[in-house]
Image (spheres, coloured by chain):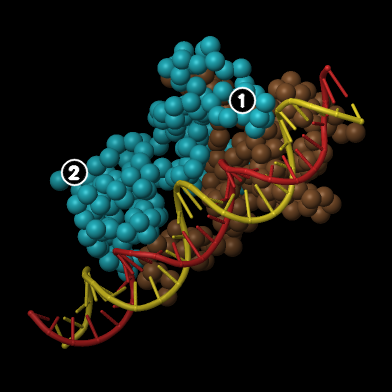
Chain colours: A cyan, B brown, C yellow, D red
Amino acid sequence: MANQVEREIFESYVRRNGGRVTPERLRLFDEIFSQHGHIDADRLYRAIRQDRKISRATVYRNLELLVDCGLVRRQRLGQRRYLYEHVHPGQAHDHLVCRVCDRVVEFMSPAISALQREIARAHGFDPAEHTLKISGICVGCASETEVAATGPSHRRSALRSTLS
Amino acid sequence: MANQVEREIFESYVRRNGGRVTPERLRLFDEIFSQHGHIDADRLYRAIRQDRKISRATVYRNLELLVDCGLVRRQRLGQRRYLYEHVHPGQAHDHLVCRVCDRVVEFMSPAISALQREIARAHGFDPAEHTLKISGICVGCASETEVAATGPSHRRSALRSTLS
DNA sequence: TCGTTATTGAGACTGATTCTCAATAGAGAC
DNA sequence: GTCTCTATTGAGAATCAGTCTCAATAACGA
């Protein structure tokens, strides 16, 4: 079975802390490790709902658990909700987010990671994790919106008159 | 008067887009430019409320306006709410956030900024803005929590047993 | 001063996440 | 296998930040 190692990490983390291994936990683990990329809590909830009863609260609680034991990363890439992704140790990466279409692209930069560690230490911080999100406009959207935009582009302006 | 330049940028941005310069807008501008560091919408609302009637909606609407014209930066540094800070052009900076006490420390790294631009371009993105948040544990909290922590430290674990 | 229409205020609304608490069910002891 | 203890679950209520609605107000150009 795939993700055997991660699954053992998970189970042993739970047991070590006096927790119980429940079918709900395992199902959530499987779901998030079968997904590629970023997924929100509601999607996970609905995916699991396909074949078993589970409550939203359980999904949230156990996502927190997965985050705590380091197997899952939770980030706000869009505006409203958190996105979750499973972590492959040693493969730290960051994100480019298109502010028009919300597409997320991952990239790795050991140079940036190293600089971050350095900076944190210089300021007396013990760096635990970081979030680097670069938002901009991707190639696709850039060509599409060339004609339109003169302002903040993607979202409605706070000034009404610009709408008319 | 201080912030004269920024204020003119603001007024001309509003006018240029067919908007109106209202006392509420000016008051919000003054408030956020009189504050140092990061502040949330509710704090701004309450600060302004001290000496004039204003509605929450107006605060949010006009914060959006300030963000749109580039005078204010909005970021999620904590978990829940957005934090706002006024921007001094040419002084891009990033943040270190202590995950225990939520203290925010600013730092500047031209090297990281340059790398970010490079990466964005390499992936066909036109970079508009970025958020780099390094969260970790600051010196103060590190020494205080030395004895305690064995787990996720600062917040309640998703596993109940660890509470007892 | 007037008229047009952008802006405001109050409160309803939304959507994501967290909380509550009674019912359920792991898992160690026997 | 059965018992017991208590961690976990489910359903829905609660929270919280932020957004929307719409009638009343007030900028600002004529």
Which quarter of the figure has residue A155? top right
How far across and how far down the image is residue B164, in percent?
Answer: 42, 75
Q: Position of residue A44 (x, y in %)?
A: 31, 47
**Residue located beneath label 2 in the image:** A2
Dot 1: what SS?
helix
User: In terms of sequence position, does the residue under pointer 2 or pointer 1 come before the other?
Assistant: 2
For marks 2 and 1, give the one nearer the viewer.
1
Q: Is residue B6 visible?
A: no
Gap between marks 2 and 1, in whole Å? 52 Å
* Chain ID, mark 1: A
Q: Quadrant of residue B60?
A: top right
Callout 2 amino acid: Ala
Q: Up-down: is D25 above or below B46? A: above
Specify the subunit that label 2 lies on: A
Q: Residues within 10 Å of mark 2 (few under 14, many from 20)?
A: few
Seen at 58% across and 30% down, the residue is A156
Do tags 2 and 1 sit on the same chain?
yes
